[in-house]
Image: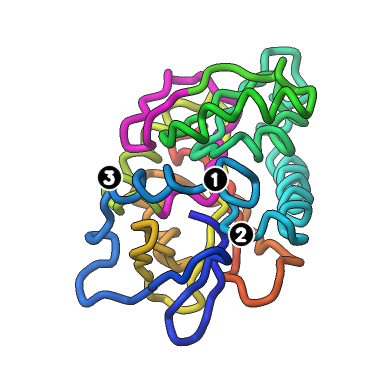
């Protein structure tokens, strides 16, 4: 689910092909088809431009990376328990959800983690990950590549410093997203966090995109789903500096409510 363009007539364009976005009478997430989503993304080139919906050759990749690294630094300043893990000597393992070709791991997570596991169900994308990490001389940071969808990913408990989900959870139905986030809550170590970086609608309505069978959620919808999953919102920021016309992109840092 790339950073789509947003228009007031509820249509969007991902830069390579026209897309149809509509607010449905029923819950928008009910129209999501995991099979249709995989079919769509399997036909997309396994390149940065492909996974970013035609924005790979704009200022977006660099701006996105800079914003993500700044957000992680901001969270470390504001959440001492999370920062203490980062300063410690224990292996700092991250997990990149909906990893695509490994762009976020290559440019962001490899700079702050010792090892990164990646979850990506689109096989041509998953097959490109080692190539991308090798080109950037960060192949030593590669952990395990899980070639499964988020709805089928069951991580080991208390195994990650943090889990990073970017431009991917819109592919999940609400119920499956809550269940996935609950599993993530069990997968982070004490003091570990879950990061979600996603498009937001400009209203309180969620919007279904039939092109890749995904939903763009409102900020209020995300907050409600996080609460249902037992997650406390610690820090949130809007990504600045993206090309004009895109949906707002918001980052969330989350911690299990039962953290003591």
Read off the residue under disc 2: 54
Mark 2 vs mark 1, CA separation in Å? 10 Å
**Residue at image mark 3:** 35
On screen, 126 above or below 41?
A: above
Q: Residue furthest left?
A: 26
Q: Which residues are magenta?
A: 146-170
Q: Say what secondary structure mark 2 lies in.
A: loop
Image quadrant where residue 47 sits? top right
Residue 168 covered by magenta stretch: yes
Q: In the visual, does 82 lie left or right of 31?
A: right
Residue at image mark 1: 45
Q: Marks 2 and 3: CB-CB under 8 Å?
A: no
Q: Foreground residue, 16 or 165?
A: 16
Q: Give x and y (percent) for residue 251.
A: 61, 54
Name the residue at 33% across, 64% down: 210
Residue at 44%, 31% in the rendered image: 123
The crowding category of the residue bearing disc 3, from other C-alpha atoms within 10 Å (few below 14, some 14 to 19, many at least 20), is few
- Mark 3 residue element: helix
Residue 221 location (% of width, % of height): 40, 64
Question: Given this view, does label 3 or label 1 mark the residue nearer the observer?
Answer: 1
Marks 3/1 in contact by CB < 8 Å: the verdict is: no
> Is 186 drawn above or below residue 228 in the view shown?
above
Identify the residue shown where x is 57% and y is 39%: 164
Question: Observer-nearest residue: 211 or 67?
Answer: 211
**x, y percent for residue 159:** 52, 19
Specify whether 129 is left or right of 39. Answer: right
Q: Is residue 229 above or below residue 94?
A: below
Q: CA distance from mark 3 to mark 1?
A: 18 Å
Q: Earlier in the sequence, mark 2 or mark 3?
A: 3
């Amino acid at each position: 689910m790339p950073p789509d363009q947003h228009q007031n007539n509820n249509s969007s364009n991902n830069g390579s092909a026209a897309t149809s976005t509509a607010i449905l009478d029923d819950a928008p997430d009910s129209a999501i088809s995991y099979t249709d989503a995989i079919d769509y993304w399997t036909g997309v080139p396994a390149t940065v431009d492909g996974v970013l919906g035609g924005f790979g050759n704009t200022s977006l990749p660099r701006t996105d990376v800079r914003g993500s690294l700044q957000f992680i630094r901001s969270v470390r300043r504001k959440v001492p328990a999370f920062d203490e893990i980062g300063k410690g000597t224990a292996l700092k393992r991250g997990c990149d959800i909906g990893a695509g070709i490994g762009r976020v791991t290559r440019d962001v997570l490899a700079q702050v983690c010792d090892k990164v596991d990646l979850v990506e169900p689109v096989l041509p994308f998953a097959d490109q990950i080692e190539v991308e990490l090798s080109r950037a001389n960060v192949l030593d940071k590669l952990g395990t590549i899980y070639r499964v969808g988020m709805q089928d990913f069951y991580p080991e408990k208390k195994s990650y410093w943090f889990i990073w989900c970017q431009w991917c959870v819109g592919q999940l139905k609400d119920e499956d997203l809550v269940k996935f986030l609950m599993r993530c809550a069990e997968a982070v170590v004490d003091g570990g966090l879950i990061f979600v970086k996603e498009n937001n609608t400009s209203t309180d309505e969620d919007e279904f995109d039939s092109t890749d069978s995904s939903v763009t959620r409102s900020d209020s919808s995300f907050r409600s789903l996080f609460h249902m999953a037992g997650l406390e919102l610690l820090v949130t920021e809007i990504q600045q500096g993206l090309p004009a016309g895109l949906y707002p992109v918001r980052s969330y840092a989350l911690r299990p409510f039962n953290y003591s």
